[in-house]
Amino acid sequence: MDKIKLGIIGLGRLGRKHAENIHYKIQNAELTAICSMVEEELESVGREMSPKYSTTDFMEIIENDNLDAVVIASSSQAHCRMVCAAAEAGRKNVYLEKPLGMTMEEIDQIKAAVQANRGMRLQVGYNRRFDASVQAAKKKLDAGFVGKPIQVRMINRDPAAMAEFIIKFSPTSGGLVMDMLTHDYDCARWFVGSEAKSVYGLGDAFVYDGLRAVNDIDNCNILVEFQNGVIGQFETSRNCSYGYHVETEVYGSDGCIRIGTVPVKDRVTYMNQGGLSRECVGWFFEYWEPTFCAEMQHFVDCVIQDTEPLVGLEDGYRAVQWACATTEAVRERKVVRIE
């Protein structure tokens, strides 16, 4: 079978990783076209991976009839404009990095555009669902291992070592809830099989004054009431002193499942007169690296097999809807009900 020809828009932090995975690891795909507004990124990827097309104009990727599918890995602020342009151009296969959009107005616009392009397949980049441990936990949950789910708890902590990057990135990320916690919410709603009914949260810039200056926060806790009665607890931080820490627990009437209880880097234990220690994983790229290739392989397989993706338009929509409500709940210190 011929390889699926992919064009990618955006070659920054995650876009570059997607380009590498398509070129080096996905056997039934080809990195055919690349787009970035940063000439250095185009030159670097072009020199290393030799795609047939290279451009600074994203519409040249969207309108390229030689491509089977388009990957959008641009900054979050450009997602709405680009995915709507792809839908209006009749593109049937699009992978879009999360979040779907930045506001309710944007995601409503995207939903209308995608639905108007009948048969369009849109996969949204919530990569955690493609983690082997997460999928194993989901299988156990569906089989009734914990009985009736009662609580789902998520911990998501970025390392303090990334403070300079986080402060610089914040104004275009949508803020802590949109940037970090939609991953947790997408995974939680998938686990418990329900949408959120209401949210309440507390948060502030406890450590980084630079985040306060751009109306963002570095720590928060969210309490979620799901429509099926499950309680959700989401705790996140951007100043973790020991590395990157992500943890999940689903507790039910008959048992409990935990993922990532200790954020270890590897299986090495160090012992000397100072005691016993283990290194912690340093950054989310390192922790989730296999999932980036797995989600892109899934996208390619969906194109070939004409099947729907595990994470689609409705999932992306619900995550942003929740994030908008949660951001309001944290900012105004009130319970927000979600329609």
Image (cartoon, rainbow, N blue to C red):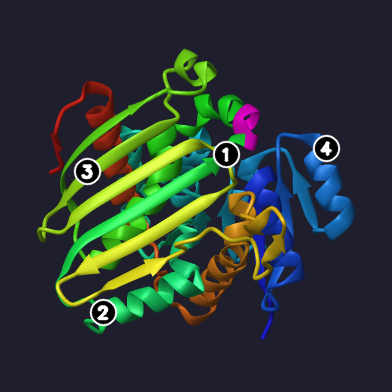
User: Which span of residues is magenta-colored?
Assistant: 161-165
- Dot 1 or dot 4: first in sequence order is 4
Q: Which mark is residue 223?
A: 3
Question: Label 4 belongs to which residue?
Answer: 40
Q: Is residue 255 above or below residue 312?
A: below
Measured in 3D between alpha carbons, the distance from the residue under mark 3 to the one under mark 1, in whole angstroms, is: 24 Å
Instruction: Indicate the secondary structure of the residue bearing disc 4.
Output: helix
Measured in 3D between alpha carbons, the distance from the residue under mark 1 to the one under mark 4, in whole angstroms, is: 33 Å
Q: Amino acid at mark 4?
A: Glu
Measured in 3D between alpha carbons, the distance from the residue under mark 3 to the one under mark 2, in whole angstroms, is: 24 Å
Front residue (pair 100, 221) = 221
Quadrant of the snapshot with the C terminus: top left
- Dot 3 or dot 2: first in sequence order is 2
Q: Which mark is residue 241?
A: 1
In the image, what residue occupies the spot 56% across and 37% down?
75
Mark 3 crowdedness (10 Å alpha carbons): few <14, some 14-19, many ≥20: some
In the image, what residue occupies the spot 50% across and 74% down?
132
Q: Is residue 102 visible?
A: no
In the image, what residue occupies the spot 21% across and 82% down?
144
Q: Amino acid at mark 1?
A: Ser
- Dot 4 or dot 2: first in sequence order is 4
Question: Label 2 belongs to which residue?
Answer: 142
Q: Position of residue 124 (x, y in %)?
A: 44, 56
- Dot 3 or dot 1: first in sequence order is 3
